[in-house]
Image (spheres, rainbow, N blue to C red):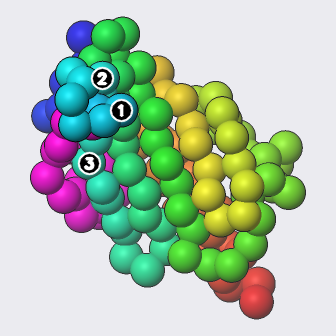
Amino acid sequence: MFSIEKIESALKEVNADIKEWKYVSENPYRRPFAIEAEYSIANKLSGKVHIRLDDSSIYVLVISKDVFNWKDRTKDLKLKGEIIDAAGGLMWIKENDAEALKEDISYLLNYVSNISNKK
């Protein structure tokens, strides 16, 4: 079972601002299938943490505020989670737990900062 508190704590450890958790449905007349919250970190990353209610899977949308294509860089990334999709400045990662989420977001913050410093 997932713990929203653990996920929030992991995000706060990397200085993320987290918005309110909301239930997500395919349409207003169907039962929610997930819960998600938006996050942002400084002027580097933003996105959503999305948790499926049926199996507690954790998916993270990562949006880089720097302009580059994640897809071109996925082979270079050393993440704990599995990259599900990447295109443009957007990337979806499936995480195993809150600790892996924290480590991956921290890694991506450093990665994006290094890119910014090379410009």
Alpha-carbon span between mark 1 and mark 2? 8 Å
Picture coordinates of residue 71, whole percent (x, y) = 79, 53
Answer whether labels 1 and 2 touch (C-beta < 8 Å): yes
Mark 3, residues whose alpha carbon is within 10 Å: few (<14), some, or many (≥20)?
A: some
Q: In the rendered view, would you say 70 is above or below 53?
A: below
Residue 110: x and y, percent? 58, 63
Could you say which disc has been placed on residue 26 in the image? Answer: 1
Distance (Cα) linking label 1 and label 3: 16 Å
Look at the picture and state if 47 lies above or below 52.
Answer: below
Give residue 67's quadrant in the image.
bottom right
Which quadrant is home to the N terminus?
A: top left
Q: Which residues are magenta?
A: 6-24
- Residue 112 versus residue 33 in the image, above or below: below
Q: Where 58 falls versus 60 (above or below)? A: above
Amino acid on which disc 3 is placed: Ala
Element under disc 3: strand
Mark found first going from the N terminus, 1 or 2: 1
Kindly identify the amino acid type of the residue bearing the numbered disc 2.
Answer: Phe
- The C terminus: image quadrant: bottom right
User: Could you tell me if residue 96 is visible in this image?
Assistant: yes
Q: Identify the residue under disc 3.
A: 37
Residue beneath the point at 72% across and 63% down: 88
Q: Which is nearer the eye, 110 or 25?
A: 25
Q: Check if mark 3's residue and mark 2's residue have beta carbons within 8 Å.
A: no
Q: In this figure, which residue is indicated by the disc labeled 2?
A: 33
Q: Please say whether residue 19 is one of the residues in the magenta stretch.
A: yes
Point out residue 9 in the picture as x, y percentages from the top left corner: 20, 43
